[in-house]
């Protein structure tokens, strides 16, 4: 049995060299990332949105379309319910502008009050604006993305823009 110890040690050593040893930030020395790392690449104020409490809501568009949303009150983010996957992960086109770390630049002189800053962000992104009403009559603006997902223009204003002086 002791004759197998050098063979086992050689196999383990070659595996460590081939795969790389994990470092403190879950990256192997070969540069590969662990599966957990690949799904948790979001940084900034919305990095922990998946674990935040939320409410399910239904809004209605001006055309009468039912629009299901999830609302994260603490973060003030209202996003299409389709963005929340069964696993709890959030993934859709509507979240990219607020989680990518690359805000849309808006010149301060463009913020005249005639149109909300979030609406300006949506238009600069080349997306469609949708107005909705909830069951209590409140109105809100949403930005619709190519995959059909939407985010409130307020969230775009808060997390998706940078004002240029």
Image: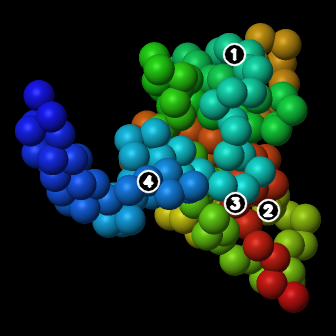
Tell me the SS state at disc 4: loop
Residue closest to the far bottom = 165
Instruction: Kindly identify which residue carries mark 2.
Output: 117
The answer to whether residue 21 is above or below residue 75 is below
Alpha carbon separation for disc pair 3 and 2: 10 Å
Q: Which is more foreground, mark 4 or mark 3?
A: 4
Q: Which is more foreground, mark 1 or mark 3?
A: 3
The answer to whether residue 100 is above or below residue 151 is below
Residues 67 and 19: in front is 19
Q: Quadrant of residue 101?
A: bottom right
N-terminal-most mark, 3 or 2: 2
Instruction: Kindly identify which residue carries mark 3.
Output: 160
Instruction: Kindly identify which residue carries mark 1.
Output: 57
N-terminal-most mark, 2 or 4: 4
User: How packed is label 3: few (under 14 Cα within 10 Å), some, or many (20 or more)?
Assistant: many
Residue 11 position within the rendered picture, expressed as x and y whole percent measured from the top left: 15, 48
Alpha carbon separation for disc pair 4 and 3: 34 Å
The answer to whether residue 135 is above or below residue 110 is above
Residue 8 horizontal side relative to residue 145, left or right: left
Which residue is found at the position 63% from the left and 41% from the top? 151
């Amino acid at each position: 049995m002791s004759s197998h110890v050098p063979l086992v040690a050689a196999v383990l050593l070659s595996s460590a060299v081939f795969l790389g040893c994990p470092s403190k930030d879950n990256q192997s020395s070969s540069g590969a990332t662990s599966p957990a790392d690949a799904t948790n690449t979001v940084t900034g104020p919305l990095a922990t949105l998946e674990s935040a409490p939320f409410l399910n809501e239904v809004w209605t568009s001006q055309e009468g379309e039912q629009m299901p949303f999830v609302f994260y009150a603490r973060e003030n983010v209202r996003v299409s319910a389709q963005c929340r996957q069964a696993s709890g992960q959030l993934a859709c086109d509507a979240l990219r502008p607020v989680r990518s770390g690359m805000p849309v630049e808006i010149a301060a002189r463009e913020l005249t009050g005639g149109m909300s800053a979030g609406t300006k962000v949506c238009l600069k992104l080349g997306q469609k604006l949708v107005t909705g009403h909830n069951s209590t009559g409140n109105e809100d603006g949403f930005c619709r993305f190519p995959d059909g997902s939407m985010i409130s223009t307020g969230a775009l204003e808060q997390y998706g823009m940078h004002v240029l002086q």
